[in-house]
Image (cartoon, rainbow, N blue to C red):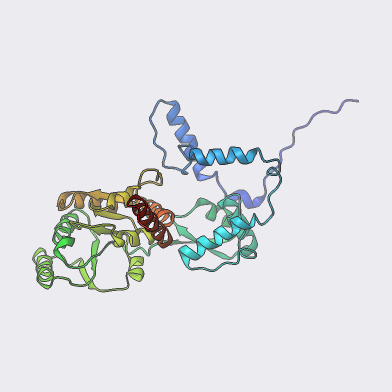
Amino acid sequence: MQKESQTYKIAPADRLASVSEYYFSKKLKEVAQMNAEGKDVISLGIGSPDMPPSEKTIETLCNNAHDPNGHGYQPYVGIPELRKGFAAWYQRWYGVDLNPNTEIQPLIGSKEGILHVTLAFVNPGEQVLVPNPGYPTYTSLSKILGAEVINYDLKEEDGWVDIGAVVRLAPIKDVKTMIYAFFELASRVPNVRLHIMGGVDDEDYAQECYALVKQLRLDNLIFTGRVDVVQYMQKLDFTILTSISEGQPLSVLESMAARRPCVTTEVGCCRELLEGAPGDDLGVAGYCVPPMYRQGLADAMERMCASRARREEMGRIGQQRVDRYFHHEQMLDNYRKMYQATAEHFHLE
């Protein structure tokens, strides 16, 4: 006796009723359709790599693939060297001490961590704070678990774009050009503020700056004097530097470390800080224009004001660049190498 084949429809769980298709999945379908139509699409979506890893990385992977002991499961908590590396990074970057043996769990990706943390701590009906903008997975998982999503802005939104300048009031900082450029910006963009933070090096020049602001009636330009820059950075959307001459400006590094993009003049190594040195493929962390170029500074600030998403992406890139290339230990090591090379060249002991 033959059995008739039957088709059974398995209904998904009720908890999935409020969950739609993954945002980036829909976007990739749209991009694929546009490509099929012959359109040239530049995707700024999920950040999938568009270039291979370095040759050294590939070579290391290939060499380890030949290791007969390298194909088993990893320990459930990851290898000790990896956990120690994570702990050192957190301490260096955030000042947080973590026990690599009990407080660090390596993951296969961010979604895995978000999933398990949400499952472990969130009950149906509870409220979950989700940053805006934020990763779509934060919201979708909370909805699956029946939690209430409460969105909050990464910078408290008050309708203003706040620009900061950490400078001494001195001619070499060209604060007057900054003031004129901001005057041009304020005529184009509503609700912008400029905070000039720093002391006075040249009293006569400072008085000229104060008088210029008064003459231009820039009520939205604030001379703060000396402030706690670290705390003040929380109020800012991006920073600006208009110096005529610089070496490696610490104010730009501080801004990037605080995840704030920058508009700078092309002096010293500013372009390298914002765009990266050869071999640095992280991306752009701000805009660089010629010194004393009011129009260019105003244009760059206007572009920065136009998109919060762009500012936040540039800020993320800047923070990664500082973390990768600009630590105190790296500076000391570079100086040692330079002195050692000099000593060897001149046969010094």
Question: Looking at the image, is 184 positioned above or below residue 193?
Answer: above
- Of 59 and 161, which appears nearest the observer? 59
Image position of 217 (left or right of 264): left
In the rendering, at what x and y percent does residue 99 appear? 60, 67
Residue at the location (34% across, 62% down)?
A: 254
Asked whether residue 135 appears in the rendered view, the answer is yes
Residue 244 percent coordinates (x, y): 17, 56
Left or right, 174 with reference to 144: left
Q: Which image quarter: residue 146?
A: bottom right
Q: Horizontal and vertical percent for residue 239?
A: 28, 59
Front residue of 96 and 133: 96
Between residues 61 and 107, which one lies in front from this camera angle? Answer: 61
Give the quarter of the figure containing the C terminus: bottom left
Residue in the image at 43% along x and 54% along y: 324
Looking at the image, how many numbered discs can be counted on the residues? 0
Whether 321 is drawn above or below 232: the answer is: above
**Is 244 left or right of 132, judged from the image as shown?**
left
| Quadrant where the image shows the N terminus | top right
Q: Is residue 259 visible?
A: no
Q: Quadrant of residue 208?
A: bottom left
Residue 73 x/y as whole percent: 70, 47
